[in-house]
Every structure is written in structure tokens, then in C-alpha cells.
Amino acid sequence: MSKNDIPVIDISDFLSGEGIEKVAAQILDAVTTKGFFYVSNHGIPQDVIDTASKGMRDFFDKPAELKNEAPVNTSQRGWLGPGMATLKGAKTHDLKEIFFWGPESWTEALNKKRKELPLIADNIWPDKESPELKQTLLPYYDHACNVGHKILSAISLALGLEDDFFLKRYQTPMARGQLVYYPVSTAQDEKEERYGSAPHTDYGVLTLLLQDMNGGLEVLNKDNEWVTAVPIPGTLVCNVGDLLHRWSNDRFSSNLHRVINKSGNERHSIAIFFDPTPDTVIDPKDMGLGENDVVKYAPIISSDYVNEQNKKSFAQYKDM
């Protein structure tokens, strides 16, 4: 499959305010018919991307005992080692490693809800062994979140929702960052159906992925064919997650995707899972229904839903 099976959307006109309706319509079509699209001219400076990418590679190049200065916890913060991710339906564990982080601060109101809502937590930075990691990632994180805001704004415009529909639900986004390392997949891995990342859908609202040039990401399209998300320089890959699929009452597509790294090189990526304020109620009725539409999903709390899916996939929850 060619990269043309996943549309490339230039959002520069949306960012400049000169062609917002056209870009919004393109994004709406992509989330409705494809579930995945590339974002070009996204406005993230190249030096910010390069710095974050180098910080990621430097971290993963360290021995396991040094990365484990920041061991993963049940708030999805810290380093998750090989063999600790087994996604729903997979025959065995994934090959990947992940470093998780999230917002650096929370509002006073959310801090008071730490005991009742999951994923409101402090970051765990490997400050002794990788003291530069935090400062290399935070500028990229902020820029990527800004892109997420713009894409959601485009969706609300195209749907005819109020201008601040998403913004008021993203006052303190539960934006979850992941650095992901994929070793080369071997013939034995393929024989045993052991993937870099097994087929899965993302749990949240919107994912923004910065992938390197080694490739390996594949998306299952509506014809039940695996389409290669070929790396395109200067782009992000954006996809709909399960929460947005629910929120839209199934109007938007949350696609299965997987990673098989056959490049012969190590693969690295940075994912930002751009989700609402943790106590946001995800209710399809709020996004608007057609006259004859039937509500397919009950309201849920965003952080509760994401956390329940995490529990099914990651080893740090097994002893809870």
C-alpha cells in the first residue's frame, strides 16, 4: 500500500486563519472515513523535534539498570521495560520499551481528586542518569499539545459545534507522552506473532505520532487490509482513539494498527495521547446526534476509561 492511502493534510492555512473551513473539512473527512491522517506544516520547529529525538535516543541507549532509575508505576509514569506490554488479543508480549510522562502540573481542583481519579500524578524523571531528558521533551510536548488543540478546534468547526466545545474540556489536558523504542523484528518474532506493538486501537481521544524514518507502522483500513504508514519527513501521524470514537457515537473511526520493525534498524517514535481534563464526561449526546440516531454509549469519565484499558495491557498492574 502507498502512503496515499492515508491522506496528508496541510494545516498551515488553518494555523494562519486564511483557509480554516477547507482544512476543517479535510480533517473531518479523514477522521470519518480513514481514522488516520498525516499532518504537514504543523508549526513545530525542527530544532525542537531534533532535540527531543536526540534525548529519546540517548535515553534508550542506556543500560536497563540506568533506565530503571525511573521504573514505571500504575499512574503510567516512568520506564516500562521489554516484555511488560501485552495488548488485548495478543498471543505474547510486545518487543517495545516505553518511557511515559504527562503534565508537569495540575490545577488545585484536580490535585484534590488524586485519590478518586486515576492518572492525575507526578512525572518520574531519571534525573540522576538522564538529567537532560526532561528539558529535551517538554518543549516538544507543549508544541504537540498546541497542534492537538488546533486539530480538535478544526473538528468542532466542521461539525458546527460551539467554538470552545473541546477547549473547555481541555483546560488541563490529560496529555500522555510516550517515548517508544522498537528493536528489529526477527524471523522468529514473526513466526511467534510477537510484534513491536501488537494490533490495537488507542484508548484516548487523539494521538499525535512523530515517527523516525525506519517505518513499521501499519494501519488496518476498512477493506481489512494492512496499509503502511510510510514515514514522510516533516509530518506527524494523527489518529482517532477509542474515546473520540465513543464521543462521536461511532461516526469517527478508531482503527487497529500495529508496528513490525523490519527496517534492519532500531525504530524510535514519540507519541502524544491528547486527552481531555481527567474528570471530563465523555457523552455522545454532547457532540450532537442526528434526528434518528440512537445513543450507543453511556457517559464515562475520561481518566477512568483510559486507566481501565491500561490495566489490561501493562504488567505493572498485574499485582493490584
Image (cartoon, rainbow, N blue to C red):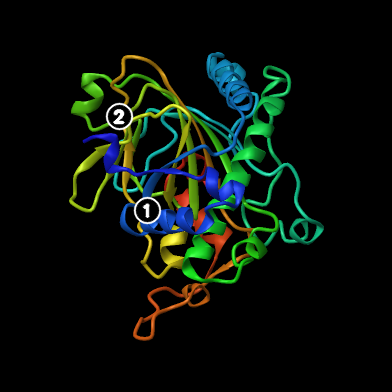
- Residue 186: image x %, image y %? 26, 19
Question: In what element is the residue under mark 2?
Answer: loop
Q: Quadrant of residue 110?
A: bottom right
Q: Earlier in the sequence, mark 2 or mark 1?
A: 1
Q: Residue at x 67, y 25 (%)?
A: 136
- Asked if the residues shown at circle 2 and circle 1 are in contact, with their CB atoms under 8 angstroms apart, the answer is no
Q: Residue at x 54, y 43 (%)?
A: 12
Q: Quadrant of residue 194?
A: top left
Eyeballing the image, is 230 above or below 86?
above
The N terminus: image quadrant: top left
Q: Crowding at label 1, few (<14), some or many (≥20) Cα neighbours within 10 Å?
A: many
Residue 275 visible? The answer is yes
- Which residue position holds label 2? 260
Q: Is residue 127 left or right of residue 3?
A: right
> In this orientation, which residue lies closer to the viewer: 87 or 280?
280
Residue 175 visible? The answer is no
> In this orientation, which residue lies closer to the viewer: 230 or 120?
230
- Residue 234: image x %, image y %? 48, 29
Eyeballing the image, is 236 above or below 182?
below
- Residue 152: image x %, image y %? 54, 56
Q: Residue at x 30, y 29 (%)?
A: 260
Q: CA distance from mark 2 to mark 1?
A: 24 Å
Q: Is residue 156 left or right of residue 145?
A: left
Question: In what element is the residue under mark 1?
Answer: helix
- Which residue position holds label 1? 30
Q: Which mark is residue 180?
A: none
Q: Amino acid at mark 2?
A: Ile
> In this orientation, which residue lies closer to the viewer: 230 or 199?
230
Q: Is residue 291 left or right of residue 138?
A: left
